[in-house]
Every structure is written in C-alpha cells, then in structure tokens.
Image (cartoon, rainbow, N blue to C red):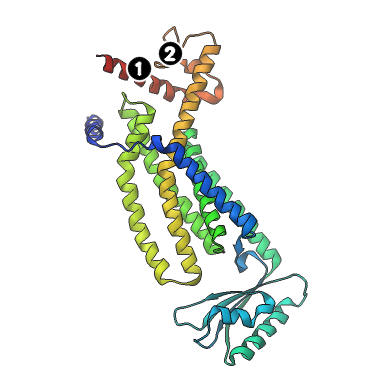
Amino acid sequence: MGLNVRKSVLRGVSSKMKLFNVTRYRVPALTTSAVLIAIFWAYTLFIAGGFNFGIDFQAGINFTVEVPAASDEQVVRDALSEFNPQVQTAGDKGGQFVIRIADDAQNDNFQQTVSKAVSSNLKAKFGNVNILSEEYIGSSFASNLASQTIWLTLIALSLILLYIWIRFKLNYAVSAITAVFHDVLFLLGFIGAFQLEFSTATIAAVLTIIGYSLNDTIVIFDRIRENFRIEKDKSFNEIINLSVSQSMSRTLITSFTTLLAVVAILVFASGTIQTFALSLVVGIVVGTYSSIFVASPVLLAWHNRELKKIHEAVSHSGHGVSSDSGKTSSGRKSAANVPEPVKQTAEEIAEATERKSRKKKKKKK
C-alpha cells in the first residue's frame, strides 16, 4: 500500500514538473568538455613544460624564513636567483616566505651547501633573517610518493567501480567512473595550465572531488532506477530527463552551499591552503556539471548501444524482432537469444522497449 501511494505521488509530481531536457545537450556538453580538457593538457605539456610539482614530489629543500616585513616574493627570489627557487608568501602578517629549491642531483653535499648559501645570501640582503624551518626531501622519497599516489587513486577508482556495479549495474558503474575521470582530467589540466603547485594538498583536493562528484551522480542514478520501476510508459531517454529534473534543485543547492564555505577559505587563506581551496572550487563546479551532463548521457548511450546489440543478435538468430516491442515473432523476449556480454541489461532494455509500444498505443487511442 505504501509503495503504491509513493508511486502515485511521484507520478503526480513528475506530471506537473517542467522537465530539463539534459539528453538534448549531451553532444555539445561532451564536446565542450573534451575541447577544454584537450586545451588545458596541451598547454600544460607543451607550453608550460609540465606540472609545477611541489617539494613533496621532487627532491630538494623546503625553507620557511622570516625577513623584514617590507620585503616581497620577488626580492627574496632575486636574493637566491642562483638556485632558481620557488617562493611563496606564508601567513598573513607579512615577512614570512616558503622557499623551495630543487635538488640538481649533481652535488653530493647538496643539503649542507644550499642551506649555508641560503642563510648567507638572505642575511647579506636583509640583515636580520630568521630561518623558521628546513626540510629536505630525498629523490627516492619523492618518486615513491608519486607512485603511491597513482596507485592509491587507481585503487580508489576500482573500489568505486565495484561498489556501483554491486549496488546498481555495470552500465551505471561505467557511466559514473567516466564522469569521475572527466572531473580528474579537467581538474588536473586546470592545475597544470595555471601552474598551481602540485602538492599533497592537491591530491587531497582531487580525492575529495572524486567523492563529492560520485555522491551527486549516485543520487541521480538512484532516482533513474526508481523512476524506471515506476514510470512504465516512459522511454529511458524520458526517464533520464525526469530524474535529472527531480534531482536538479538538490544538486545545485548542495553545490552552492558547499561553494560558499570553500570560497571563504579561498578569499581569506594563503599559500597551500588557498591553492587547495581553488582546486575544490573548480572541482565542485566541474563535478556538479559532470553528474548532470556526463554521467547520465553516457548511461543513455550505453543503453542505446545494448538495445542495438539485442536487435542485431535476435535478427541473426532467425527470429523476427520489433524495434518497438523488443519481442521475438514467437512472443518471447529477445533476451534469451542475446550473447552473454549483453544479457545483464537485456531484461532492462526489453522492458524499456515494451514501454515505447504501450506509449504508442496510448497515443493512437
């Protein structure tokens, strides 16, 4: 009884709701994403010369120093120009800087030599200098950290794929992972193109966005699955548009409120935290976009592809099949004659084709 009431309520809401035709814009949306990602990565690799890796991902020394407040980054950079340092302002009071100097792997006493030279050069330039901290990252540690980061990200994506496969189906899992890959490629391309520092904070931002985007996608997919069971007279294309429309306000409001907090961090923070916040801002926007314009259209494309395979498999088996009903000439559903890789969605697609047939009959009446 409760389920029937829920179905009637949802049908009433969907009949009054103005639908957003997301599938109509799937081609321009996916094309725009592909073009932007290609531009970002091309600029990163061929013009910027690669990512701006922080000290965590390359061998070198990381200094935190305090000099007279009147100094700026360029003055500090000029004082240590022989080492080609990376200099960033640290803190809000002024006068504190983070200095990163990469190890050239040509000096066996690199740490001692550079440490003394930095101290003497800064004192010669500013007089009163206080070295607050000094950290050396070896080449083996940097390479191990990079490889571990890649493996952990791949493992996380694999577990996500497995989880969605179990909770939904393989077509939902592949669509969600496609959206996640879109988000990661876009965010990394943005970071590389604008030469933001690639540090452990960047990895944290990427993993955060993966979880955030995936949550939005699962909400929409759950609504698609529920509407698929309720809306018997709608095509899969219409179900996707209905589900996205029903989830749109929730998705946009959640993203907006999250952005308010992250933008506050972006405005008032500095250094690594500011870069982390900027990555989150871009990731949240892109993740919201991909949940609507990437994941659902990919799911629709998969559905149409499997439907085509079913029709081809049945026609080759010697039985007739109607493109509207999804049944063989003997009245049996075509799923029985479908090759093994296609069987997992055959029942779902056959039901969808039956819906089209019922809908056409209603229009004739």
Point 59% across, 55% down: residue: 43
Is residue 29 left or right of 114 when viewed as pictured? left
Is residue 152 left or right of 208 when viewed as pictured? right
Point 61% across, 66% down: residue: 56
Give the CA distance from mark 1 to mark 2: 10 Å
Q: Amino acid at mark 1?
A: Ser
Report the residue that reaches farthest toward the bottom. 127
Q: Nearer the viewer, residue 73 or 243?
A: 73
Is residue 110 left or right of 122 when viewed as pictured? right
Marker count (numbered): 2
Is 205 situated above or below 267? above
Question: Which residue bears the numbered disc 1?
Answer: 357
The percent position of residue 222, horizontal first and vertical second, equals 37, 38
- Quarter of the image with the C terminus is top left
- Quarter of the image with the N terminus is top left
Point 43% across, 11% down: residue: 332
Is 3 situated above or below 51? above
Q: Counting other residues with Cα less than 10 Å from the Cα at mark 1, is it few (<14), some (14-19), or many (20 or more)?
A: some
Circle on res. 322: 2
Tell me, yes or no, if residue 113 can be seen here: yes
Of the two numbered discs 1 and 2 on the same chain, state the one appearing first in sequence.
Answer: 2
Circle on res. 80: none
Is 315 situated above or below 152? above
The percent position of residue 88, horizontal first and vertical second, equals 54, 74
Is residue 345 left or right of 118 when viewed as pictured? left
Query: For the residue labelled by badge 2, is the local secondary structure a helix, a strand or a loop?
Result: loop
Q: Amino acid at mark 2?
A: Ser
Query: For the residue labelled by badge 1, is the local secondary structure a helix, a strand or a loop?
Result: helix
Q: Counting other residues with Cα less than 10 Å from the Cα at mark 2, is it few (<14), some (14-19), or many (20 or more)?
A: some
Point 34% across, 28% down: residue: 229
Circles 1 and 2: CB distance less than 8 Å?
A: yes
The percent position of residue 139, horizontal first and vertical second, equals 70, 66
